[in-house]
Image (cartoon, rainbow, N blue to C red):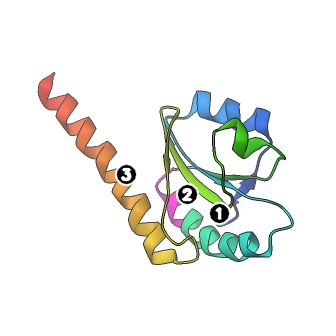
């Protein structure tokens, strides 16, 4: 569904990260009211990502953050080929989050162009 971030469990997330080259994952605690405010902002961003055929999922499983070495939640992580990049800005600032996402995607575009030129 466009504009709605899919909730996944740990097994589903591991499968997604094995199958997808790029994925944004929001780790949060279900009972955290701040996380739900952030999710409202992220769902607007998710709608834009869906149009680019990029995936964003959310996970609130107990221990999921520790499984990925994340001490603090809520947390947004971009996985590129299984390698995590952690957003360190203000998750409540939609513009800041979107800029970070675009920066991550630009880095990937630069890598693709560089590889294509070298081939």
Q: Nearer the viewer, mark 3 or mark 2?
A: 3
Q: Quadrant of the N terminus?
A: bottom right
- Is residue 31 positioned above or below 82 on the image? below
Q: Which residue is mark 1?
A: 2
C-alpha distance separating marks 2 and 1: 6 Å
| Residue at position x 41%, y 62% in the image | 100
Q: Nearer the viewer, residue 50 or 107?
A: 107
* Location of residue 17 by image quarter: top right
**Sequence-earlier tag: 2 or 1:** 1
Q: Which residue is mark 3?
A: 105
- Is residue 18 positioned above or below 97 on the image? above
Label annotation for residue 50? 2
Taking the view exactly as shown, the residue that stands out farthest to the top is: 119
| Residue at position x 86%, y 67% in the image | 31
| Residue at position x 30%, y 47% in the image | 107
- Check contact, mark 2 vs mark 1: CB within 8 A: yes
Q: Is residue 104 left or right of residue 69?
A: left
Q: Nearer the viewer, mark 1 or mark 3?
A: 3
Query: Which stretch did the figure color magenta?
Result: 48-54
């Amino acid at each position: 569904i466009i504009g709605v971030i899919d909730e996944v469990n740990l097994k589903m997330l591991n499968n997604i990260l094995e199958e997808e080259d790029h994925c944004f994952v929001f780790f949060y605690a279900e009972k955290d009211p701040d996380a739900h405010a952030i999710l409202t902002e992220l769902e607007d961003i998710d709608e834009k990502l869906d149009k680019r055929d990029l995936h964003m999922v959310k996970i609130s499983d107990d221990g999921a953050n520790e499984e990925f070495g994340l001490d603090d939640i809520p947390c947004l992580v971009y996985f590129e080929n299984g390698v995590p990049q952690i957003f360190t800005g203000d998750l409540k600032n939609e513009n800041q989050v979107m800029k970070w996402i675009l920066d991550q995607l630009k880095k990937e575009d630069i890598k693709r162009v560089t590889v294509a030129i070298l081939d």
